[in-house]
Image (cartoon, coloured by chain):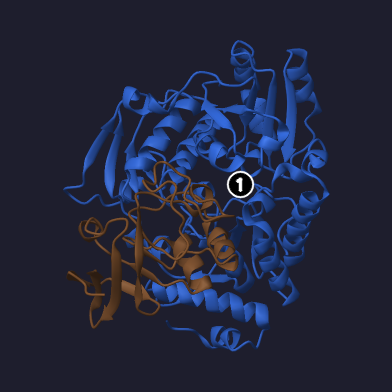
Amino acid sequence: MSCERCINVVDAKMIGKEIEGKVIKINVLSFLGDIDKDTGLIVSEESGAKGSFIKDHILVVKRFRGSTVGTYIIYSLYKKGIAPKAIIMGKPDPVVLAGAVLCKIPIVYNIPDGILEHIETGSYIKITSTSNGISICIC
Amino acid sequence: MYLNKYEERMLRGEYGEAVRIAIEVIVHIGEALGAEKLIDISHAHISGISYFNIGDEGLEFLNDLVSKGAKAAVYTTANPSSIAILDPFTNVYGRDIVVKQYKIIELLKSLGVDDKSFTCIPYKIRRPKINEHLAWAESSAVIYANSILGAKTNREGGIVALMASIIGKTYYSGMHIDENRLPTEIIKIDFPIGNIFEASIIGLYIGNITKGIPYIEMNMNVEDDVYRDIIIRNLLASIASTSDSPMAIIEGITPKFDKIMIKGGLERITIDLAEAKKFSESICSNTLFIGCPHITVDELRHISNRIFLKAKSLGIEKIFVALPQNSEDIILIAEEFRKRGIEIVFLKGACPVVSNLKELNLHSLATLHGKAFHYIPKLGGIKTCLVNVV
């Protein structure tokens, strides 16, 4: 697949291998309460992505909120085989980071808001490490 | 990350498999967050106790860790469980759920969790001192510890707090470092806060707009210290429900607030009551929930007259009150309420918000707490409304 444009993000961090896949863009998210832990369906209106299943998708999350039980929910989704493919965020959230590390879900953080704005639900993106950050390609 | 010789031995598995797993998780998270080292903690507080939340996967995770020899290395408390194990509700939920909820609690006790805790206000069981390093989960307790007690804790995931308990350490990052405890904006509340209801709606609103650590200028027209503390607890718990904020600096209340450097050019936001009141609704139920975060028996006694005054006129017939596990018997208060035509059900060591409430044949539950208002529809599965009762 050819990618129409790539953006270099200096100082962004990535844990995991190269990532590529289809995006679900989320305005605000708590893994506890905003996602049905048995199906992986987003149930919160405020998320802006109600009705989407997170399985096999890259979650691009503008802001996290709320419960510290989120780490357990990520673990539970992973064990059921319905966890997201990767999670992309601005400021790293310790609750989500812990779940991702535990379940080896690739994670990208320190992405400025202005760049998150360019990524939309349904986009297909590729993310790779660079010497001083990451490169996000929208394909 | 720098590890001392003792920590390296932990990582090599010389102190057992559970310790090895625990330090590996903490080091991985710490490295991701840029931590240079680990630090000793004095108190861990674990969330993720309700079977309804963590499910079979969470139970298996705990079971596996305990079978590998996991033990708390420092003083450890835990959040409330679901209400499934309490007498009035065991028949409602059925044997399978009750047994699994008991199993989670027994595993935590075998790990060394203080069996008097099972509360979301661990600071009422053991009050940390200023500058003490903690590894606490439970967002409302984290924000209270940093903002009111001057202790230092990140908003840890439930599993991370458990791992930190097993090694007695956490990663040195975020809220443990003074330069990260600075305000991100100044919020002025344009009217005096006088009750839990107002604190809740303001807190939910602030959580929605803060970028991290709000510096809050506010007045409270409440003289009573016990009630003031409950109000502040609710303000903070509400902020933590709608944000990822681990701390708020409240002018005049946060320890050493006057020593905190406020950078020039911070955004200044003024909130008036009309703006915040979009969260409030009319009464939706004749059953009321009090205790989110938990309330102590002394606090309940203290505000019971305020409840008597309003609850009846709002048509409240039954009140669920959630309290810490170690709460003394409360027969006298219950009797006082009963005489006034209100049934009171005490939920010791438990929380209805983390329980399936549809099974109770409740269609809705009124509350005065912003946190409960935020989570009851999401986790309990029923309607709720925020009301001004005390």
Q: Residue at x 69, y 60 (%)?
A: B56
Position of B69 relative to B112 (above/below)? below
- The C terminus of chain A, quarter of image: bottom left
Q: Is residue B144 left or right of residue B360?
A: left
Q: Check the picture and name the quadrant holding the N terminus of chain A.
A: bottom left
Amino acid type, callout 1: Cys
Determine if residue B250 is in view: no
Q: Is residue A52 placed above or below B17 in the rendered structure?
A: above
SS class, disc 1: loop
Q: Position of residue B169 (x, y in %)?
A: 55, 71
Mark 1 — residue? B120
The furthest residue to the front: A1
Left of B27 or right of it: where is B366? right
Residue at coordinates 69% horizontally, 18% vertically from top-left?
B317
User: In the picture, residue A129 is in which quadrant?
Assistant: bottom left
Between B8 and B377, the residue placed more toward the observer is B377
In the rendered image of the structure, the colour used to display chain B is blue
Chain of the residue on which disc 1 is drawn = B
Which sits in the foreground, B359 or B218?
Answer: B359
Q: Which residue is rendered at x = 19% and y = 71% of the image?
A: A6
**Does residue B176 appear in this view?**
yes
**Left-right relation of B229 to B273:** right
Using the image as rendered, state which of residue A53 and residue B357 is in the foreground. Answer: A53
User: Within 10 Å of the Cα at label 1, are there few (<14), some (14-19), or many (20+) other Cα atoms?
Assistant: many
Measuring from the top left, give residue B171's x and y in whole percent.
47, 71
User: Can you tell which chain is drawn brown?
Assistant: A
